[in-house]
Image (spheres, grey):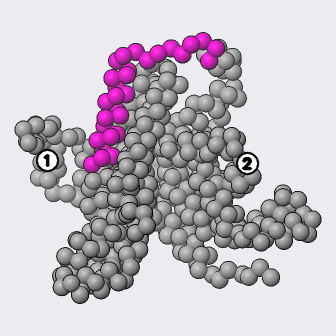
Amino acid sequence: MEGLAVIHANLDYLLWGTWPDGPLGGAALTLVLSVVSGVCSAIGGLLLGVLLTVLQGGPRQVLLLVLGFLRAIPVLMLIFWVYFLLPMLFGLNVPGLVPVVCALSLISAAYLAHAVEAGVAAIPQGQWNAGYSLGLTRWQVLQHIILPQALRMMLPSFVNQWITLIKDTSLAYVVGINELSTVASQVSNRVMIHPVPVFLFAGLVYFILCAGLSALAAWLGRSPQPQAS
Amino acid sequence: MARFFWISRFAMPLELLAPKYLVWMANGLLMTAGVAVLAIVLSTLAGFGLALARDAAHSGWRQLARGYTLVFRNTPLLIQLFFWYFAAPNLLPENAMLWLNTPHRLGLAGFTLGWPSFEFLAGTFGLTLYATAFVAEDIRSGIRGVPRGQYEAAAASGLTRWQMQRHVILPQALRHALAPLFGQYMNIVKNSSLTMGIGLAELSYTSRQVEAASFLTFQAFGIATLGYIGLIAVLDVLARHVQRRVALPVGN
């Protein structure tokens, strides 16, 4: 049971890095990264999804092309790009966390945009007509009648995307961010002879986060749809 | 400073990568394609097994398959790759590791293939196990899309359980599952980039190498990105072609 002793000796470091004496790291940073990118991508996905339903013709094709591009390249490649382009565009050195959050949010928003579009399309045409007949504009109908109903249906997609995000934060490893995967490989390298318990423990932490959220998504999906009265 | 540098760089024609670096990138692309194709083939075969196990008559198989799916889908691929590369060698008997690390000759229909590196073995293995959990779910949804009557018709024709799956159910299930399956194959290509985390010299890895050696960041990442888009496009064309081949005649 030396393995358990290794985990025990490094538990604090694996869970929150050197915090509160140093920067936050480990599982806590994984969670923070996933929450921040989750919120950014939810907002971005909502905006892009609404754009997809509103735009027509040329602009819509351009947007589809951009979304297709984001979905066709590996997250890792996008992290490289943002990591390299951000300092050039803004002429300053941004902290390493920013490119990772940007890349994860962008890809995730590209996936959510299609879910939002589908959610809006699933609302019966009668709802639009009812809104128009009340004298509301297209934008008002979308904002007050369509989106509140569509969002309720799309909630499971948002939670599922968040699960994907938690797993994808592990890619921050390639740019040396101290989240759970990086910290686990550091501990494993330092201790040398016990990689098995270290990586099993890291896997377990991810599993608890993801499977927990997954259960939440299933529960949200199963709860009866409140009727629009 | 950096801003002016950026403008001047784009105002000038882009400097091309030296042929030496293009060779590195081409090798990386080949490695990505190789790992991806292997993982696609192996995960499809294993995915059929897992899909059948998930709906097996014996509850032991069902529980096992459920557990596998749960664990492999809810942990990051990178951690799984770390496990297979760094941790699994400690679990294997010493002889097995020795065997994996010594070069063997693989004679295949007249060709002699070099024995792959341990990075390649662990990377392909890890990617396959991860992808299997996703591929199986798509095959399973395909199986569920086959109407009940097909089972009854097959049973009435006197087919055994295995014959029924092989000749009646799975071919139809595959047709339903084709679109999502090709989606998973595209994910496999993209996910193969994570094997750079264990030091496999695939496309992402070589783009970083070329960038560090040539300082032509834009070109290095640009070529790698185009490489991935090219591979995804090939799969897309293939998907359309296969779907057209297996489509039922209209009006049937």
Which residue is identified by label 1?
A: B98
Taking depth in this image into account, of B133 and B241 the one nearest to the observer is B241
Task: Residue at 61% x, 56% y: name it.
Answer: A114
Any part of residue A207 in sight: yes
Taking depth in this image into account, of A223 and B155 the one nearest to the observer is B155
Q: Which label sits on residue B50?
A: none
> Mark 2 to mark 1: distance in Å?
60 Å
Locate the C terminus of chain A by quadrant.
bottom right
B213 magenta-colored: no
Which residue is identified by label 2?
A: A55
Any part of residue B199 in sight: no
Q: Residues within 10 Å of mark 1 (few under 14, many from 20)?
A: few
Task: Residue at 63% x, 37% y: name it.
Answer: A95
Locate the N terminus of chain A by quadrant.
bottom left
* Residues in magenta, as a range: B10-38
The relative height of residue B207 versus residue B228 in the rendered view (above or below) is above
The relative height of residue B206 versus residue B214 in the rendered view (above or below) is below
Point out residue B83 in the picture as x, y percentages from the top left corner: 34, 55
Taking depth in this image into account, of B180 and A42 the one nearest to the observer is B180
- Examine the image and state in which quarter residue B56 appears: bottom left
Task: Residue at 15% x, 57% y: name it.
Answer: B93
The relative height of residue A41 versus residue B166 in the rendered view (above or below) is above
Q: Are marks 2 and 1 on the same chain?
A: no
Q: Residue furthest top?
A: B12
- Drawn side of residue A88 relative to residue A133, left or right: left
Point out residue B73 in the picture as x, y percentages from the top left corner: 43, 64
The relative height of residue A223 versus residue B135 in the rendered view (above or below) is below
Count of picture labels? 2
